[in-house]
Image (spheres, coloured by chain):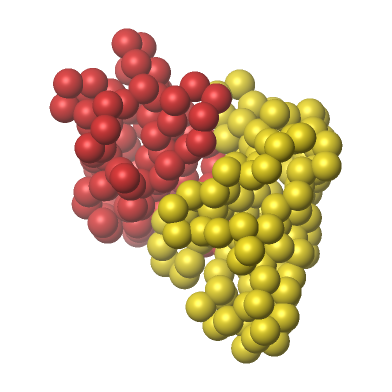
Chain colours: A red, B yellow
Amino acid sequence: QQPVQSPQAVILREGEDAVINCSSSKALYSVHWYRQKHGEAPVFLMILLKGGEQMRHEKISASFNEKKQQSSLYLTASQLSYSGTYFCGLARFGDKLIFGTGTRLQVFP
Amino acid sequence: SAVISQKPSRDICQRGTSLTIQCQVDSQVTMMFWYRQQPGQSLTLIATANQGSEATYESGFVIDKFPISRPNLTFSTLTVSNMSPEDSSIYLCSVYSNTEAFFGQGTRLTVV
């Protein structure tokens, strides 16, 4: 089953914060986060492993709630370069990666 | 890290024909993955290609429509057979390296 992301779309002004959620009906082992810009391939942001710590990539961080089978991506003080579509991906180690429904983020000056 | 060369980058094909997409990786990998991304949508896994064995297909995808070859640990092909306009999409190959997924640049297919 495909993970469900919310919201589907976010519009921000530079400097504003946003949270993107990823929910799964299956138990999570690891959660990936990717950003895809228009016409480009997805780019890896971070991975969260079961039992691991909250990860951080510049001003983007993520958390992993095993009980709720949910992960959240936190974008702080957004920049124009943050615009794109964000996907979570669920996988077991060395196994196939199943991507979430996606969240489109637009940051304006 | 892994660098993936995928080709062609785009093609326009007549319905009823077939197109073969190639992916070359700069290192040996056990599994390669093929995804389809329809306009404005997420990435949908088509199949997992293992060297030396048949590909494993996801629900909704069949070998007759999307035959895959994996002759060695650095190369794979995906063929889109008997194409229809509904096959118009972006096709991406992907590999894992140290828990991170890397992607080819994608093949933008338009079927007319």
Q: Nearer the viewer, residue B53 or A17?
A: B53
Q: Residue at x 56, y 74 (%)?
A: B87
- Which of the 4 image quadrants contains residue B94? top right
> Would you say residue B40 is visible in this rendering?
yes
Q: Quadrant of the N terminus of chain A?
A: top left
Measured as percent of width and height from the top left, residue A99 is found at 41, 45
The residue drawn where x is 71% and y is 37% is: B53
Query: Which corner quadrant of the image does residue A29 belong to?
Result: top left
Q: Is residue A90 above or below residue A109?
A: above
Please give the count of numbered marks on the rendered protein.
0
Can you name the residue that lies furthest to the left here? A68
Q: Please, is residue A68 above or below residue B14 in the view?
A: above
Taking depth in this image into account, of B6 and A75 the one nearest to the observer is B6
Relative image position of residue A67 (x, y in whole percent): 17, 21
The residue depicted at 62 percent of the width and 82 percent of the height is B111
**Is residue B93 toward the left or the right of residue B52 in the image?**
left
Report whether B72 appears left or right of B51: right
Camera sees residue B103? no
Q: Quadrant of residue B92?
A: bottom right
Q: Foreground residue, A11 or B82?
A: B82
Query: Where does residue B66 sit, x and y in percent of width and height?
Result: 63, 61
Task: Give the image location of residue A59, x and y in percent.
Answer: 38, 30
Q: Name the residue located 67 percent from the left edge and 84 percent from the top edge.
A: B16
